[in-house]
Image (tube, rainbow, N blue to C red):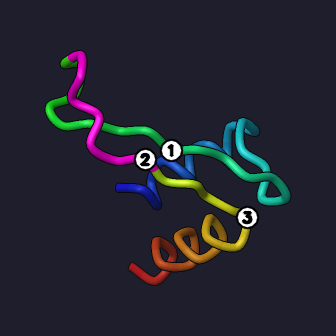
Amino acid sequence: MIADVIDQGIQRGVLNLEKTYILVAGDPVGTPGSTNLIRVLTGHEMYFFCTLKNKD
């Protein structure tokens, strides 16, 4: 799922592999206070996730 989000962000020009981003997610989606994932994504990690997606 993270690979899909990153791929879409890069395709839409919202994400840049030369920058660092913070990913915040929660389950169930849309429920206040349900954040259970906070991740700092560097360009190196985003590139890694994109290569995983392309292997499928």
Amino acid type assigned to the residue bearing label 3 in the image: Gly
Say which of marks 3 and 2 sits in front. Answer: 2
Say which of marks 1 and 2 sits in front. Answer: 2
The reply to whether callout 1 and callout 2 are in contact (CB within 8 Å) is yes
Q: Name the residue under label 2.
A: 38
Q: Mark 1 points at which residue?
A: 23
Looking at the rendering, in which quadrant would you find the N terminus?
bottom left
Question: For mark 2, does the 10 Å Cα neighbourhood hold few (<14), some (14 to 19), or many (20 or more) residues?
Answer: few
Q: Residue at x 24, y 22 (%)?
A: 33
Looking at the rendering, in which quadrant would you find the C terminus?
bottom left
- Which of the labelled discs sits on residue 13, or is there none? none
Q: Residue at x 42, y 56 (%)?
A: 2
Q: Residue at x 70, y 73 (%)?
A: 44
Question: For mark 3, does the 10 Å Cα neighbourhood hold few (<14), some (14 to 19), or many (20 or more) residues?
Answer: some
As drawn, 51 above or below 12: below
Q: Position of residue 20 (x, y in %)?
A: 73, 52
Identify the mark nearer the N-term, 1 or 2.
1
Amino acid type assigned to the residue bearing label 1 in the image: Leu
Amino acid type assigned to the residue bearing label 2 in the image: Ile
Residue 47 found in image quarter: bottom right
Question: For the magenta stretch, what is the residue range?
Answer: 32-38
Q: What element carries label 2?
A: strand
Q: Mark 3 points at which residue?
A: 43
Q: Label 1, label 3: how many angstroms apart (C-alpha)? A: 13 Å
